[in-house]
Every structure is written in structure tokens, then in C-alpha cells.
């Protein structure tokens, strides 16, 4: 945490927990009888609850999107670049809500929480989740907060998929959807990357069929490898070349299999850090939710028909160097919206940063994002 909190930060924040006793029927056919949702809020809800913005997190994200939890925090929330006073999602104008999805490992009910029927961690017995399930659970959070309609639902990557699902399933409950670095469904290549990551976890000898909590261990190496594979896909070739090139860690070859190139050191560090902070069962669940996402499936496999269900305005943004969710995938969404007669703005940002660009302070991106969200805030003011 910095010595003094920047003026454009939301500052110190405290997570909150919503306990829901109403059963949640899931797409997998199971029912979650009760559950907890951990979330954070920033800004102030106005009198008619018309200025609320929902932030949906990506695969490895969580509820802590902005600000600091305390003096020991080494870094702020994962979207500090975009949430705060005067930032694209301006907390002087919006009331921002960010939950940790069900199945997560940062406080919401998931594999690490206690199964009330056994008194043990859910582990692999926690129900399989889908984007539709997450959106349905988020409506319960909105109801509890007194929010009948979101000014906007916003998300990048897997978060963008949730924004789309919101617009399709609950069209009257949001006025704008912001989909950043998203896709209407995963390609075979993307599913393949996810499967490699899952197999690295499932085959780790410390996985114990997902019940590693009972063995006081965890599939460390599997998580490290999963994160390394994923991280490669989040960066572009240009980004990796600019950041690392072929630089050697010690300046010379050692002719062995230990770390020699800087990029190797970086990936191992990222994997090790991730393995200490993320749950393996959650990683498996989240990647399967990504694989399952396909809103067109319920509408004769027509994305246009799916988008005909929507009523909100859309902002879709992509990044030209993103090869995980390439710009053409965003254009599929845009074209479907245009064919469905919906209001959509689209921008493709020129940057070498790859898929992770949606998390970074890229001037053109934040300027466009801020301009659109400024219009959303102006609508709120005009409505009031």
C-alpha cells in the first residue's frame, strides 16, 4: 500500500457477505440449497438506485476490484486502473458492485467452503457452475441491495461473457452492457488450452481426486503448470518479445534444464505465486464454465436470435494483439447485435499487450471506456 492513498483511489474497502437461503437451481441439474456471496462496493447508491454498476470478474479474478484492504496490501484491487474517482468507472458518479462468483475461492461458496451435509470442504463435490448460474445468483445480490436495474453490467474476458448473459437472460435489468476482450463462445483451440491446464492439475499426485484439503496438501505443480500455460495465452508475441526477448538470466548458457531465459523465470514466478493464492478445484470449475458458455445454443445456435432477447445498449471493445479472444470474436458479437437491430458501439484498440490489455492503463482504451461510461452517468443524472 502506498504511504498515502491516491486521490483517484476508492481507498480502504471492506468485503461484505450476502447469505442466501433461497435454493439455486443450476444448469447441471443440481440445486444449491443455500450459499454465500462475498462482494465489495465502491461509491454511493443514489436515492432511486439508478447509478449501480455491476463488475463481473474474469477466470482468476475475485470481488476485490479496487482500493485496499489494509496497510499490508502490496497492491490494490485488480481493476484499480478503471475504478475510482475520475476513472472510467467513476465512483463519484456510480455505485459499483463486484462479487466473487460462486465456485470461487475468495469467500463465496465454493470447493473450499464447508459442505453442510458432511462438515468437510465441498472439494470436487461442489456443483459444476455455468455463466447462467452466476448471473442468476447475481440477481439475488441485486435484489438484496435494492437494485432493480443496473446502469451497466461490465466485464472483461469471462466477465464480458457474464455481461452478455445478463443482457440475454434479464434484459429489463440493465441499461448498458460493456463486453471487453470477450467471445460468444470458446474456439476448439481455447477449449484445448483449458484442457491442458486441467490435466496438469488432475494428474498431479497431490490432487487426491480433489480432496487434497483432507491430506493437508494441494496440487502445487499442477497449478503452476496450469497458470504458465494460461499466462502464455494472455500475452502477445510482441508483448513477450518487448518484455523479455531472449535475455538470459545470468548472461550465459548453462546447458541444463534450470531457468536460463528471463521468460522462463517470469513464468515460473507467476505460476508459483498463483499456486499459493488460488484453489485448484476452483480453477477446474472456472475453466469448465468458460468451455460451456454458448448463449446461442438455446436459440437454435443463432447468436442473432440470442441477441434479439436483449434490450440494453452495448459497448464492445477488443485488442488487436489479443489472440486468446481475437478481435474477430468481438466482431461476431457486434454483427449479431447489428443484425438483431440493437444499439452497439465497437472499438478495436491498437496495442501489443495481448488479452491482458483489458486490465492495463492503455490511454486509448481508458479514454474510450471513460467516454462511454460518462454517457451512462449522464443518463443517470438526466433521469434523476
Image (cartoon, rainbow, N blue to C red):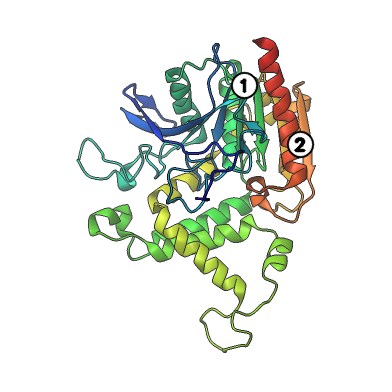
Residue 301: tell me if it is visible: no
On screen, residue 146 versus residue 156, left or right, reads left
Of 179 and 83, which appears nearest the observer? 83
> Badge 1 local density, few (<14 within 10 Å), some, or many (20+)?
many
- Please tell me which residue is depicted at 69% across the width and 28% down the height of the picture: 373
> Picture quarter containing residue 152?
top right
Which disc, if any, is residue 182? Answer: none
Where residue 192 appears, x then y in whole percent? 57, 55
Residue 235: tell me if it is visible: yes
Task: Classify 233 as above or below 297.
Answer: below
Where residue 153 appears, x then y in whole percent? 60, 28
- Please tell me which residue is depicted at 42% across the width and 54% down the height of the picture: 277
On screen, residue 101 versus residue 313, left or right, reads left
Q: Which residue is mark 1?
A: 151
Of 232 and 211, which appears nearest the observer? 232
Spatial separation of the CA atoms under disc 2 and disc 1 = 18 Å
Image quadrant for the C terminus? Answer: top right
Q: Secondary structure at mark 1?
A: loop
Task: Classify 311 as above or below 259.
Answer: above
Q: Which residue is mark 2?
A: 368
Contact between labelled residues 1 and 2, with CB atoms less than 8 Å apart: no
Where residue 27 appears, x then y in whole percent? 44, 31
Amino acid at each position: 500500500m502506498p504511504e498515502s492513498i491516491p486521490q483517484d483511489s476508492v481507498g480502504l474497502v471492506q468485503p461484505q457477505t450476502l447469505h442466501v437461503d433461497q435454493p439455486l437451481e443450476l444448469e447441471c441439474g443440481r440445486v444449491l440449497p443455500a450459499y454465500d456471496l462475498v462482494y465489495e462496493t465502491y461509491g454511493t447508491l443514489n436515492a432511486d438506485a439508478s447509478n449501480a454498476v455491476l463488475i463481473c470478474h474474469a477466470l482468476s479474478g475475485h470481488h476485490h476490484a479496487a482500493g485496499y484492504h489494509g496497510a499490508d496490501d502490496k497492491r490494490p484491487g485488480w481493476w484499480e486502473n478503471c475504478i475510482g474517482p475520475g476513472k472510467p468507472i467513476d465512483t463519484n458518479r456510480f455505485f459499483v458492485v463486484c462479487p466473487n462468483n460462486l465456485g470461487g475461492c475468495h469467500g463465496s461458496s465454493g470447493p473450499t467452503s464447508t459442505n453442510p451435509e458432511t462438515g468437510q470442504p465441498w472439494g470436487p463435490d461442489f456443483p459444476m457452475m455455468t455463466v447462467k448460474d452466476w448471473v442468476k445468483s447475481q440477481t439475488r445480490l441485486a435484489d438484496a441491495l435494492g437494485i432493480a436495474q443496473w446502469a451497466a453490467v461490465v466485464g472483461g474476458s469471462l466477465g464480458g461473457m457474464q455481461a452478455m448473459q445478463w443482457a440475454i437472460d434479464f434484459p429489463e435489468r440493465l441499461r448498458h452492457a460493456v463486453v471487453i476482450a470477450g467471445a460468444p463462445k470458446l474456439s476448439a483451440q481455447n477449449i484445448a488450452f483449458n484442457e491442458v491446464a486441467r490435466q496438469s492439475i488432475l494428474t498431479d499426485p497431490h490432487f487426491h481426486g480433489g480432496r487434497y484439503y483432507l491430506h493437508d496438501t494441494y496440487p502445487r505443480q499442477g497449478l503452476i503448470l496450469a497458470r504458465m500455460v494460461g499466462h502464455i495465452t494472455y500475452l502477445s508475441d510482441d508483448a513477450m518479445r518487448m518484455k523479455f526477448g531472449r535475455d538470459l538470466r545470468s548472461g550465459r548458457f548453462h546447458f541444463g534444464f534450470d531457468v536460463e531465459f528471463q521468460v522462463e523465470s517470469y513464468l515460473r514466478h507467476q505460476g508459483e505465486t498463483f499456486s499459493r493464492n488460488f484453489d485448484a478445484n476452483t480453477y477446474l470449475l472456472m475453466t469448465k464454465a468458460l468451455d460451456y458458455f454458448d448463449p446461442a445454443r438455446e436459440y437454435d445456435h443463432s447468436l442473432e436470435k440470442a441477441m434479439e432477447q436483449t434490450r440494453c445498449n452495448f459497448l464492445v471493445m477488443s485488442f488487436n494483439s489479443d489472440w486468446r479472444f481475437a478481435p474477430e470474436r468481438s466482431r461476431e458479437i457486434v454483427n449479431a447485435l447489428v443484425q438483431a437491430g440493437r444499439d452497439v458501439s465497437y472499438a478495436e484498440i491498437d496495442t501489443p499487450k495481448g488479452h491482458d490489455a483489458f486490465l492495463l492503463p492503455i490511454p486509448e482504451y481508458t479514454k474510450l471506456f471513460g467516454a462511454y461510461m460518462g454517457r451512462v452517468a449522464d443518463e443517470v443524472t438526466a433521469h434523476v
